[in-house]
Image (cartoon, helix red, strand yellow):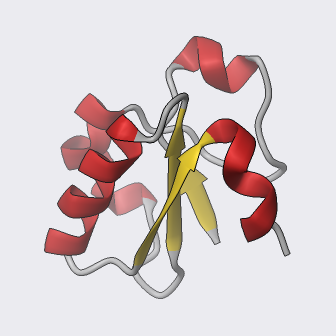
Amino acid sequence: MQRLLRSKTEFEGGHLRKSINIPLESIPKRLGDLDKNKPVITCCASGIRSGSAKRMLKAQGFEVINGGGWMSLEKYVV
């Protein structure tokens, strides 16, 4: 799974191993960095930006799970 969507400062404060960070405003330019064959989990501090990112990515054909806030991601870690 691919995980993304926190500010640089949030990401530096902690992230899951193998996560990539793509801030919301950078998604359109960085779609090529994501693999459409793997689900994407979006997360941010509160879950609001991750919901916006989910809508953007789903419109581009990605399978997306809104992981919500950073602290709620434990349930998605396999």
Q: Is residue 6 above or below residue 42?
A: above
Nearest to the observer: residue 14 or residue 18: 14
Q: Is residue 33 above or below residue 11?
A: below
Nearest to the observer: residue 74 or residue 16: 74
User: At x 25% / y 47%, what residue is drawn?
Assistant: 52
Q: Is residue 70 above or below residue 6?
A: below
Nearest to the observer: residue 43 or residue 18: 43
Q: Position of residue 23 (x, y in %)?
A: 40, 31
User: At x 34% / y 37%, what residue is drawn?
Assistant: 49
Q: Position of residue 71 (x, y in %)?
A: 73, 39
Q: Is residue 50 above or below residue 45?
A: below
* Quadrant holding the N terminus: bottom right
Q: Position of residue 15 (x, y in %)?
A: 76, 37
* Quadrant holding the C terminus: bottom right
**Where, by quadrant of the figure, is residue 27 drawn?**
top left
Q: Is residue 35 left or right of residue 62?
A: right
User: At x 76% / y 17%, what residue is drawn?
Assistant: 13
Outermost residue, left side? 59
